[in-house]
Amino acid sequence: MAQVHKRFGDSEVKALLEKYIKKEVERKYIQEILGIKKRRFFELLKSYKEDPDSFTVKYKRKKPTRKIDKETEEAILAELKIEKDLINLDDNPIVDYNYSYIKDRLQRNYHTKAALPTIIDRAKRYGFYIKKKKKKAHDREVVTNYAGELIQHDSSQHNWSPYSKKKWYLITSIDDCSRFLLYYNLVETETSWAHICALEDVALVWGLAYSYYFDCHSIFRFVQGRDSFWRKHYKVTDDVDPQVKKILIDLRIKVRYALSPQAKGKVERPYRWLQDRIVRTCAREGVKDIGDAIEILRDEAERYNFYQVHSVTGEVPYYRLKRLTDEGKSLFREFVLPSPYLSSKDIFSLRDERTVNPYRKISFNKLVFPIKGAPIREKVDLRIVPDMRSGMAEIRMWYKDNFIGIQKARNEDINLKNFK
């Protein structure tokens, strides 16, 4: 609603205030007529009582309007032009303008400032504006009471840079209560091992959470479809534990699943926020390599975690997490190595088992390893830990809670894609 001075003259407002003073009209009716709140009504009333003769509702600006200089205006238009080119690109997730991002770019890259309304005004004036579609209302709220009560974990595949020929996967873990991003990384291929690395990082840095929340991707959950007329399934949903779930069971962390994409809204919103800014920055800097994109991801995630006030909680995620921890409202537990394991590698690893043959050997993906410490025809547990830098994997062998040795193999011989 327009301001009072744009809709009423001084004499009209004075007349209404006089009626209130004489108790001829109740306050609520005058508020409705003027279209103002209670606080504004009493401000006007006080001003009128103090000096009725000079009373006015006309607005007097205390400070002159701040005009942007020529260089700032040129910078705004240059950034808007880049935004328009991005929107017009094919196979690109950017579909509209992000004026808040431009505001941040001006401060970071041009060392100048411009108010958001000023940027939007220039966008409309020069044709860099797309009217946003009305979205269905969604009730966003925090449903958990403790940090670590629920960790939402997911991945998202996108063309993060217009100059890259490949789509990369963003893997994140976010604490539901504080909205703090506990883990984030870009990978070229989505594997169980990539998600296990995320679990390990969160556990060793932040501690063991109370529960994890996943979608029904095969990496996180075994879901069996309905039987056909010619085939009967012998395993039903959740009869098989995927690699990620096995680790969480060992750590006594509860596992929950989202039954629809809408149920993952809290982790999807940070995805959209990160996706939007990462793509725009990668485009401006001509990023082709995933390593450079990861550096941009780190900058944006740091901004989100330590500087951005969250629209739902009204707090910066890091300071909200710290406050919850200081108040004793945290369900994170210290990571303690479960018995009888000797290293965190025995927990955060790919799992498999093989039977010892009469020659006291086991075969694994066409590799043959001699076995000591396990009888023939008995099963040996394998805990496989790939090293992505060296390209070699460490295979740790266990038999009935006894560690019986280590073998080495190349990552490609392990075939990480087969583990789910």
Image (spheres, rainbow, N blue to C red):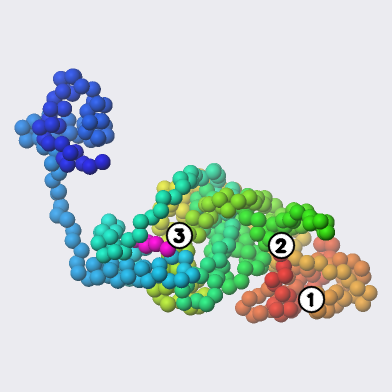
Near-viewer residue (347 or 248): 248
Separation of disc 2 and disc 1 at Cα? 18 Å
Q: To which residue does mark 2 refer?
A: 243
Identified at 30% across, 71% down, the residue is: 78
Determine the CA span between mark 1 and mark 3: 42 Å
Determine if residue 243 is in view: yes
Q: Which residues are magenta?
A: 95-99
Q: Quadrant location of the C terminus?
A: bottom right
Is residue 272 found inside the magenta-colored segment of the image? Answer: no
Mark 3: amino acid: Trp
Give the residue type at disc 2: Gln
Residue tagged 3:
273
State whether residue 387 is above or below residue 348: below
- Report how many numbered discs are placed on residues in the image: 3
Q: Is residue 411 left or right of residue 230?
A: left
Query: What SS does tag 1 mark?
Result: loop
At x 63% / y 50%, what residue is drawn?
Answer: 259
Q: Which residue position is annotated with label 1? A: 365
Tag 2 and tag 3, C-beta contact below 8 Å: no
Which quadrant does the N terminus fall into? top left
Disc 1 crowd rating (10 Å Cα; few below 14, some 14-19, many 20+) is few
Residue at 86% in and 66% down? 379
Q: Looking at the picture, tell me which residue is in the foreground, 158 or 318.
A: 158
Element assignment for label 2: helix
